[in-house]
Image (tube, rainbow, N blue to C red):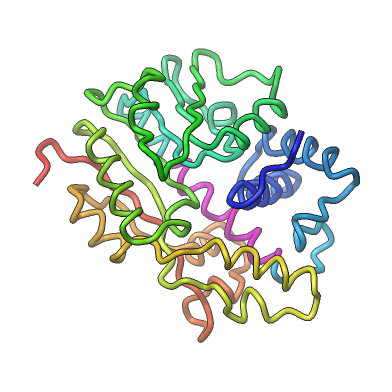
Amino acid sequence: MEIPEGVGWTALMTAYARAQDSRRADALVDDPWARAVIAQATEADGGAHLPRLGPARDDGSSELWTSLGTYFVARTPFYDEHVLAGVGDGVDQVVLLAAGFDGRAQRLDLPSGTTVYEVDSGPVLDFKDAAVAGSAVRDGVDRRTVRVDLRDDWSGALVDAGFDPTRPAVWLAEGLFMYLDEAQSDRLLTTIGSLSAPGSRVATEWFERNPAGEASLVDRPDDQERLAGEMVGSLFRSGPPAPPREWLAAHGWDVVEVTDVGARAARHGREVPWMFDPAHPDGLRVHLAAGRRPAAVR
């Protein structure tokens, strides 16, 4: 089966990072589906390592991969916590926008009766389904895939899959908005809001600036790393038009948490790469933000 290209490639990098982290004694995430996806991708690539993932190495020799891998893993518990907070409040619909190879339907302790909607492109979900075939989700959890491009009219496809906009939902937009421009970001959050009953939650992230072409990505002595950095940067767009606190509030969400990837990494005892250290002159601040839909939208 063909390995997905474009943004699907970055989803594979996220899975690689989670699969690596699963092997650590101090793992932040144990993700069997990530391991299954990487095993399938490795077989498809014809070797023990995935050349197409460039810096994704297991020996610690790539500073770029150490930085990116820390980012992919350190943000994971933030999203997990907000899913679990939502279902703990009785929300039984979880929507993973640009779900990629996410394994939350299988690895999180979701209550029986929870439905997890995975929204992504056909090639990504087809690859994932083949990798995790025969691997069960949590008992009583209903996993439903919605094959649609989020730049298109995706809300109808979600409702057709059984989503009920009259009941609250938990929305995750993990690793998504940096690939959209301002208008696309606003349109997507507006659509999320139109489908969100009171008590719904949303969690997402926001890059303070577009890092395309910056030294942290492309100033690398290794050609494979440099090309990978250029590839990652080429996918970036402007993202949301305002910082997350202001942006979420403007769309009718009560902000419940705003933090950043560097702070999250430090909180979990991980070294903060300079790429994601706001104190470094060339560091990126990547905000992680979550909001809740109030009883009456202002």
Find out whether residue 141 is within the magenta segment.
Answer: no
Reply yes or no: does residue 77 show up in magenta: yes
Horizontal and vertical percent position of residue 189: 30, 47
Q: Which residue occupies the extreme right position in the image? A: 47
Identify the residue shown where x is 47% and y is 39%: 149
Q: Which residues are magenta?
A: 65-82
Q: Is residue 83 above or below residue 138?
A: below
Quadrant of the image containing the N terminus: top right
Nearest the viewer among 90 and 128 is 128
Q: Main secondary structure of the magenta part?
A: helix
Q: Is residue 89 left or right of residue 128?
A: left
- State the residue at coordinates (72%, 29%): 131
Q: Is residue 218 above or below residue 127?
A: below
- Residue 258 in the image: x percent, y percent? 34, 59
Relative placement, left or right, of 67 versus 94 is right
Task: Tell me where residue 113 sits by quadrant.
Answer: top left
Query: How many marks overall?
Result: 0
Q: Residue furthest front?
A: 152
Give whichever of 251, 21 is nearer the camera. Answer: 251
Q: What residue sits 66% from the left and 38% below the top?
A: 30
The image quarter containing residue 127 is: top right
Q: Residue at x 47, y 34 (%)?
A: 148
Q: Position of residue 164 (x, y in %)?
A: 29, 21
Q: Would residue 172 appear left or right of 297 to someone viewing this image?
A: right
Locate residue 9, reporting x and y percent.
65, 50
Camera-nearest residue between 201 and 272? 201
The quarter of the displayed image where residue 177 is located = bottom left
